[in-house]
Image: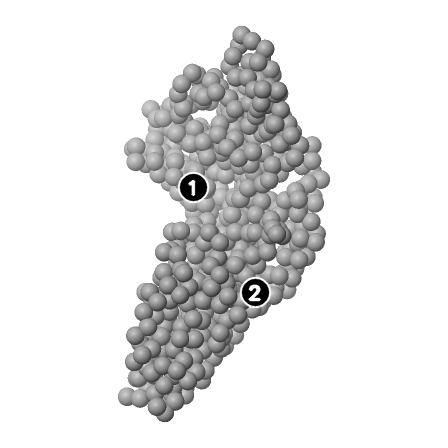
């Protein structure tokens, strides 16, 4: 059976064979299966060595000191640890947090939880291109603001925030700055020795590492302290207890090392592929790219084909695996909150498709996808009463819909 | 959650896609839903002198289940009288297409569409 072409790299990535092969060495009796915390025997020392090496690999990619890397079960846990950890530790200084409406649920839901516990959170509206409005941010900071959390690269629209400028504002106002870098690490340069960032979340499975593995950068200079969220043994300098999953950690380290070595070439290649994909649609009528096209990660193309609903298009192009911002694809029947926050109309949000290309995408994949999408969009527009109305010159905003 | 076979069939081979003349006295047009909800169906029926639906056409903006529900409805109403057509229940659509719970509202919208088309036709004869 021919499996569909994978173009959903922003959702997850396959584990690189080199990473999987290395991980396999840390599982069985024949491998280094020991507990890295066993300080008194060979098995523990072998595991500890592997963990230390991986810690350096992760630190090297992002310009950090290995002692600033805390292992977690993924970026979701890292986000929880950073936000709850800072809020609870520094709450005597203040209880106000600032973030963006377009953040990942791991950040938004964590903030909601803190609101239930007595914190105040301001969820800012982004600019129409997805970027943070720096002036608005400055104006929102108060005496009691302790933390700001903004993702480096947005998972849905791929826009890249200006961490230097945001960090400078945070430093001036003594606000801790947390960055969710799940979608950016290994794809664009990050140098934490220069950037004014206090905490940064990393994910392994977005960069050809295993799922269920991540890390949190916690700055030592200036020193940032956290209230731990997982207790039991004091691992990771008391910040995150739990036996270290050597094979997972080795996997993340190897994935990050490969990313560091191949980042330049891979991002050039991915950008060309994304451009090729976009060029395949740019002459079509009523096509909109969501989010800034320049300040954007190489692999992401989030695009709306107006008057064609997203899920019906995904079903039509089922030979290509992608995702959509349409309500029909979510069990809540609400369209993408990220696209809504950009100010997109509901129709455009329902009509959006996210293509994300990656390490194993070929030019042929892109060319085949273009042919398929063009054909199906045309077919679905022939089926669409909204397309008829648009062609007849009717302004859809002026219609009184009989919604139920 | 893979797509249901019957839903896919209606999408691959849609029945009765098209437009009838909405000004004609024997044509009823029902347009329901809203772009904001991600579902808009336009269903049109044409009756002969005996009040039997001889032709039906649809166009839908919506997911596969919505397309299939409206397509199925146009198949079912042909050859029925207006009264018979207004008896069609959304649950019959759900059963025929094997719609999962999260897609039931698509069948409800289709039922609304045929009723709206029938009402439109009746208001013309008044």
Q: Which residue is mark 1?
A: A105
Q: Position of residue B103 (x, y in %)?
A: 39, 59
**How much space separates mark 1 and mark 2, taking CA atoms?**
31 Å
Using the image, determine if residue A261 lies above or below residue A365.
Answer: above
Q: Position of residue A92 (x, y in %)?
A: 33, 24
Relative to the observer, which residue lies in front, A292 or A140?
A: A292
CB under 8 Å between discs 1 and 2:
no
Residue A84 showing in the rendered view: yes
Q: Secondary structure at mark 1?
A: helix
Residue A181 showing in the rendered view: no
Q: Which residue is mark 2?
A: A377
Indicate left or right for A393 with A20 as reference.
left
Other residues around mark 2 within 10 Å, as few (<14) / some (14–19) / many (≥20): many
Other residues around mark 1 within 10 Å, as few (<14) / some (14–19) / many (≥20): few
Q: How many marks?
A: 2
Q: Residue at x 52, y 28 (%)?
A: A215
Query: Are the residues under marks 1 and 2 on the same chain?
Result: yes
């Amino acid at each position: 059976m021919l499996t569909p072409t994978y173009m959903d790299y922003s959702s997850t990535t396959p584990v690189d064979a080199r990473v999987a092969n290395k991980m396999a060495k840390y599982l069985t009796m024949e491998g280094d299966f020991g507990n890295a915390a066993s300080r008194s025997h060979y098995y523990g020392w072998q595991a500890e060595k592997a963990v230390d090496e991986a810690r350096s690999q992760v630190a090297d990619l992002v310009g950090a000191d290995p002692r600033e890397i805390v292992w977690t079960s993924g970026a979701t846990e890292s986000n929880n640890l950073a936000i709850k950890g800072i809020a609870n530790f520094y709450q005597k200084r203040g209880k106000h947090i600032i973030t963006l409406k377009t953040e990942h649920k791991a950040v938004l839901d964590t903030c909601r939880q803190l609101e239930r516990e007595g914190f105040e959170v301001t969820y800012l509206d982004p600019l129409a291109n997805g970027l943070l409005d720096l002036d608005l941010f400055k104006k929102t900071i108060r005496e009691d603001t302790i933390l700001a959390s903004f993702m480096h690269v947005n998972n849905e629209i791929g826009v890249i925030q200006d961490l230097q400028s945001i960090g400078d504002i945070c430093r001036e106002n003594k606000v801790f700055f947390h960055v969710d870098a799940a979608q950016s690490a290994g794809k664009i340069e990050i140098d934490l020795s220069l950037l004014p960032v206090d905490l940064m979340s990393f994910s392994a499975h977005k960069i050809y590492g295993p799922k269920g593995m991540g890390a949190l950068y916690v700055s030592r200079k200036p020193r940032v302290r956290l209230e731990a969220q997982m207790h039991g043994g004091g691992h990771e300098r008391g910040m995150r207890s739990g036996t270290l999953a050597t094979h997972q950690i080795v996997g993340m380290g190897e994935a990050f090392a490969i990313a560091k070595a191949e980042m330049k070439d891979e991002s050039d290649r991915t950008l060309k592929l994304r451009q090729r994909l976009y060029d395949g649609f740019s002459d079509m009528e009523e096509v909109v790219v969501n989010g800034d096209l320049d300040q954007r990660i190489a692999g992401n193309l989030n695009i709306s084909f107006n008057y064609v609903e997203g899920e019906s298009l995904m079903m039509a192009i089922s030979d290509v695996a992608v995702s959509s911002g349409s309500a029909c694809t979510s069990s809540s029947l609400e369209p993408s909150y990220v696209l809504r926050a950009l100010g997109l109309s509901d129709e455009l949000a329902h009509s959006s498709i996210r293509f994300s290309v990656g390490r194993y995408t070929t030019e042929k994949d892109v060319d085949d996808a273009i042919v398929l999408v063009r054909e199906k969009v045309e077919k679905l527009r022939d089926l669409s009463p909204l397309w008829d109305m648009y062609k007849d010159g009717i302004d859809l905003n002026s219609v009184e819909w009989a919604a139920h | 959650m893979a797509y249901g076979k019957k839903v896919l069939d209606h999408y691959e081979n849609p029945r009765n896609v098209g437009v009838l003349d909405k000004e004609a006295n024997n044509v009823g047009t029902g347009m329901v839903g809203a772009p904001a909800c991600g579902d808009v169906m336009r269903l049109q029926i044409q009756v002969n002198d005996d009040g039997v639906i001889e032709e039906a056409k649809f166009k839908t903006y919506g997911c596969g289940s919505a397309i299939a529900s409206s397509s199925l409805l146009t198949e079912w109403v042909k050859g029925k009288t207006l009264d018979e057509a207004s008896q069609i229940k959304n649950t019959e659509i759900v059963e025929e297409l094997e719609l999962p719970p999260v897609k039931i509202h698509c069948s409800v919208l289709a039922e609304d569409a045929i009723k709206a088309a029938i009402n439109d036709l009746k208001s013309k004869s008044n």
